[in-house]
Image: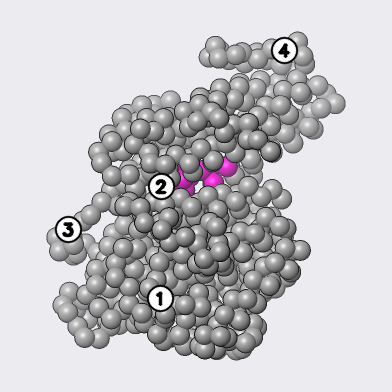
Amino acid sequence: MVDPFGALGLIGTIDTAYHWGAELVALCKAFANAETQLHESVVRVEACWLKIQLQLEFIRRLEPQLNEWHKNIQQQTLEILLQKLHAANTKLSGLVKKSDALPSGTGEEATIVEVKRLKYAFAKDGLAETVKDLEFWQGIFDPSWFLMMRIPGPEVDQQLYLMSQQQSVLTHEAKAAIPIAQQLRRALKPVDDDGTKKTIYLLPGGLITESVQTLAYSPVRIARRADNSELVVLDPITCISRANINSALRDIRNFARRLKHTDPFTFGLLECKGIFNEEGSDTKTSTATPPTGLSFVFRMPPTHSHVQSLRHRLLSGASGEHDSLSARFDLARQLVKAVSYVHLYEFVHKNIRPETILILRKENHGSVNAGECDETAMLVGFDVLRDAEGKTNRLGDDDWEKNLYRHPHRQGKTPETDYNMRHDIYSVGVCLLEIGLWGSFVEYGKVDEKGQSSFGTASLQPFSVGSKLRAEVKDRLLQLARGTLRRNMGNKYSKVVETCLTCLDKGNGDFGDDGEFQDEDGVAIGARYIEKVVQKLGEISV
């Protein structure tokens, strides 16, 4: 099938999106004038479009600076937007009287129209679907748009500044896009490590000691700050897999700085308040042994005070949350986007598994207004993270409950290969498989009153550090992806999982060629991940 938008080019695609987007907003305003009950949906459509319009203008201005990887991913993502805009316009325009013409590029307000009485329900459903489509598409588009913050040179900063001065008529959602991008841009710039180190380590006594409690089926703990009783997540750092402790501490400090002003609902990463040293040991001097007592301190969004690990959810089975298809797809999309942003911040996670995926929920869960973020997934467990370009140390362990989420070449006490971003993608594939099957691959013993639990047995057998059995586990995961998962979640979802699980295989046409990912700015692997995982999941309709 020939792509009808492929010949437009990036600028032509942007121009067409402008035209159809303006037409959609004009049509929606006509519905708002006709029926006050449709007003809320119309406002959401307009707000979403204003943010999209702002981001499209930014791409237009930066187009000469984009390399082929950037252009291709932007083009592919925008083609999905065109399809959604065209479909929405076609559907909604058929619900108004033929005699009521809409303005065409005049900038005038839409004339008041009357929705045909028998078609009112269709208009309401059509607007609701339009809102859902645009907001889903926004979730696909944001990772590729923020990827442009990696472009070197002053042009990105100049355009961000110019656009920040032209936002007086924009909605709150649209205005937020530029400051978030500016904060990300600043975070990606090199810092003077010695000159800013003191601002990262938090003072002793900053937490209410009696408030600290473990979180079931997760390495993190929850606590309250002493100054304002704000909830925080304590994510322990041990550095046990890092031979060079000074290098590990540098990566830890840099990561904490980069997440100091992150937006959790955009990036799926909690805002880092700093590093807490419970034991008061000196982290500024060289040491032959890994420091203990260190934790990242992540701020919990005040609107989402209930937290649970994904492992806890999976162990709850069909009677728990996310047992519906739509809920599982939402969770999967949030996970893959969060991983894309870890890579965007130029780090590899190295520890992606259900224990390190938190699900934050509003206290008034189930009674929020349509469109509000009720639940959201956040990545934690950054114990062994590493700068993506830093030296990797082939140090591991024989913990089967962790090795299950590692590629066969990265399992055991002495992994066979150096770690790279694709190993994170493999771990994502295992987690997506569990989410799709909605069952836990790891069985735990009972949780005691302190939240501690004991390990049980693997639900996937065999598992061993032997290379042959490692490969058998991967083969078993692929069998599940191609069989049970495909029947449960559909072909598209199972294909994404298969792509992740085979991302280091030579036969994988999307990720298997090492030579494709040797670009200087490190954009290629991120763009391919967005294209083949984030975007593909976002395209699935439920």
Colour setup of the view: one colour
Residue 97, quarter of picture: top right
In percent of width and height, residue 497 lies at: 61, 63
Q: Quadrant of the N terminus?
A: top right
> Does the CB distance between marks 4 and 1 fall below 8 Å?
no
**Amino acid at the residue labelled 1:** Thr
Nearest to N terminus: mark 4 or mark 3: 4
Q: Going 69% across and 48% down the picture, which residue do you hit?
A: 541
Q: SS for tag 1?
A: loop
**Is 139 part of what is drawn in magenta?**
yes
**Amino acid at the residue labelled 3:** Asp
Q: Which residues are magenta?
A: 137-147
Q: CA distance from mark 4 to mark 3?
A: 62 Å
Q: Going 50% across and 30% down the picture, which residue do you hit?
A: 9
Q: Residues within 10 Å of mark 1 (few under 14, many from 20)?
A: some
Comparing marks 3 and 2, which lies closer to the viewer?
2
Residue 490, quarter of picture: bottom right
**Amino acid at the residue labelled 4:** Asp
**Is 433 part of what is drawn in magenta?**
no
236 with respect to 153 (left or right):
right
Q: CA distance from mark 3 to mark 1?
A: 32 Å
- Residue tagged by mark 2? 147
Q: Going 27% across and 62% down the picture, which residue do you hit?
A: 254
329 with respect to 175 (left or right):
right
Q: CA distance from mark 3 to mark 2?
A: 24 Å
Q: CA distance from mark 4 to mark 1?
A: 66 Å
Q: Going 50% across and 59% down the picture, which residue do you hit?
A: 511
